[in-house]
Image (cartoon, rainbow, N blue to C red):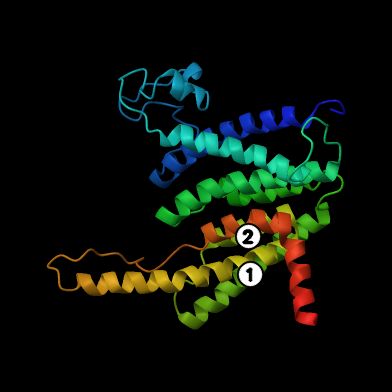
Amino acid sequence: MEEIPLWYWLIVLFGTGACVGSFYNVIVYRMPRGISLLNPPSHCPICKKRIPLRYNFPIVGWIWLRGKSACCKQPISIIYPIGEALCGLLGALALYAAAGFGADITKPMLDPEKWATAATLFWLLLGAYPVCAIDYKYKLIPDSISVGGIVAGLLISLIPGGVTPFQSLLGATVAGGGLYLLGWIATKLLKKDAMGFGDVKLLAGYGALMGLTCAVETLIVASLLGVILMVPYAKLMARKSKANKGRKNPPENEDAGQIPFGPFLAVTAPFMCLWGNQLFDFYLKFILE
């Protein structure tokens, strides 16, 4: 490893990210439909025939089949290879960002702290894909991402130089427990559900991955982004609702004007992992001066 250049690991992380993206495609399709992620194995959604392993390679499989299923020759959505390629790029980006933008890719990366950051960013960046796709449409957050983040954070904390096991456990407990308490209080005050338990588990996972401080920063910045975007969105949905009142069969949507909180957390977390400390220092300097 001491002699392996960074560019080699970037290729490895791209391939790994593409494989993870292929699995996330399965999660995005199956989980909202209540289908097991393991059984049945990969199969054609049209004729139900099992897909051979050679066609399951990310990106390459779709190109090999020319965008059509091997069994019934039906078109395969291009969204699948796009999602795999995006996750591959995010996987490589996680490592390059941890190494430092502008790092010499011909030299090896030996600092264990940077590898710990790369592993954390890998989870955060790739996990944002299924969280945003599923939570926005179905108001669900996969446990494989939220609870899995807690497990991943505790394992990554074993790498020297990064978040320690104690900081990881503290971050998961306090961040998740604190958000649960806030949601419970808001629910009592508003007399309706104010926070989904999926968001609580997701933030607990971020606490395990990044530590308590970055998890709290993620919550604050995500909340601000949510407020900024929710105000105009709620107004737009109110106008649509008002316009639909005159129709004979107006569309019914109980969630009109609502945006789930999970995507805001998922998009904010990688930025806080990279620049949360600098942002906090800038804020303190701004307040004190």
Residue 254 sits in quarter: bottom left
Dot 2 amino acid type? Leu
Which residue is most to the left?
Answer: 248
Is 281 above or below relative to 132?
A: below
Position of residue 173 relative to residue 99, above or below, is below
User: In the drawing, what numbered circle is on residue 220?
Assistant: 1
Q: Percent position (x, y) of residue 117?
A: 76, 47
Q: Quadrant of the N terminus?
A: top right
Upstream in the sequence, badge 2 or badge 1? 2
Disc 1, SS: helix
Query: Which quadrant would residue 29 be assigned to in this image?
Result: top left
Q: Residues within 10 Å of mark 1 (few under 14, many from 20)?
A: some
Q: Is residue 148 visible?
A: no
Give SS at disc 2.
Answer: helix
Task: Tell whether 259 sits left or right of 119.
Answer: left
Residue appearing at x 45%, y 27% in the figure: 42
* Residue 161 seen in the figure: yes
Query: Which quadrant holds residue 215?
Result: bottom right
**Residue carrying label 2:** 203
Q: Is residue 144 rendered to the left or right of residue 192?
A: right
| Residue 26 in the image, given as x and y percentages of width and height | 47, 36
Relative to 259, is 75 above or below? above
What's the residue type where badge 1 is placed? Answer: Ile
CA gap, disc 2 and disc 1: 12 Å
- Between 289 and 26, the one lying in front of the other is 289
* Label 2 crowd (10 A; few <14 / some 14-19 / many >=20): many
Q: Position of residue 20 (x, y in %)?
A: 58, 35
